[in-house]
Amino acid sequence: MIQQSPAFTFNIFPHQEKLRLVVFNNDEEYVCRIESKKKLNQFLEENDARLFKGRLQLIKNQDDISIQVKGRILGELSIEAFRELLKN
């Protein structure tokens, strides 16, 4: 689990044959997105700067990924930390 701010945390969980990306607010689920591991890995490898539309979005910079929820950046994590979450 990656702590994004005092109230928000981010984690990735297996969900059937896909992955579930979850943002928690004070340990309660705030928003989630279900996506394939293949699409998440493509996002890391390609030049796309943004993944997803809607409430939860991932924005890739050179060395990190910003987590945006409802138009507000809640935190960032390194690309390497994101890769580690995908391995679990």
Image: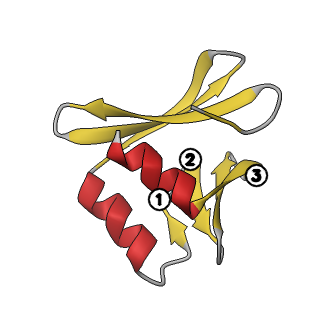
In this image, 11 relative to 41: left or right?
right
Tell me the kind of residue under disc 2. Leu
Task: Point out residue 80 in the picture as x, y percentages from the top left corner.
Answer: 53, 59
Quadrant showing the C terminus: top left
Which residue lies at the image location 76% right of the left edge and 52% below the top edge? 73
Q: Specify how the rendered protein is coloured.
A: secondary structure
Using the image, tell me which numbered label, if any, was put on residue 56. 2
Q: Earlier in the sequence, mark 2 or mark 3?
A: 2
- Label 2: how many residues lie within 10 Å, few (<14), some (14-19) or many (20+)? many
Question: In the rendered image of this protein, does residue 35 appear above or below residue 6?
Answer: below
Residue appearing at x 73%, y 39% in the figure:
4
Image coordinates of residue 33 in percent, x first then y, are 43, 41
The one of 56 and 14 positioned closer to us in this rendering = 14
Identify which amino acid the numbered label 1 is placed on: Phe
Whether residue 64 sits left or right of residue 13 in the image: it is right
Q: Position of residue 84 (x, y in %)?
A: 45, 49
Q: In this view, does 49 lie above or below 80?
A: below
Which is more toward the observer, 39 or 77? 77
- In the image, residue 76 sits, relative to residue 62, either above or below, namely above
> For mark 1, does the 10 Å Cα neighbourhood hold few (<14), some (14 to 19), or many (20 or more) residues?
few
Q: Mark 3 points at which residue?
A: 73
- The disc labelled 3 sits on which kind of residue? Ile
Residue 85 sits in quarter: top left
Mark 1 and mark 3 in contact? Answer it, CB < 8 Å.
no
Location of the N terminus (image quadrant)? top right
Q: Which mark is residue 52?
A: 1
Whether residues under marks 2 and 1 lie with C-beta atoms below 8 angstroms apart, the answer is yes
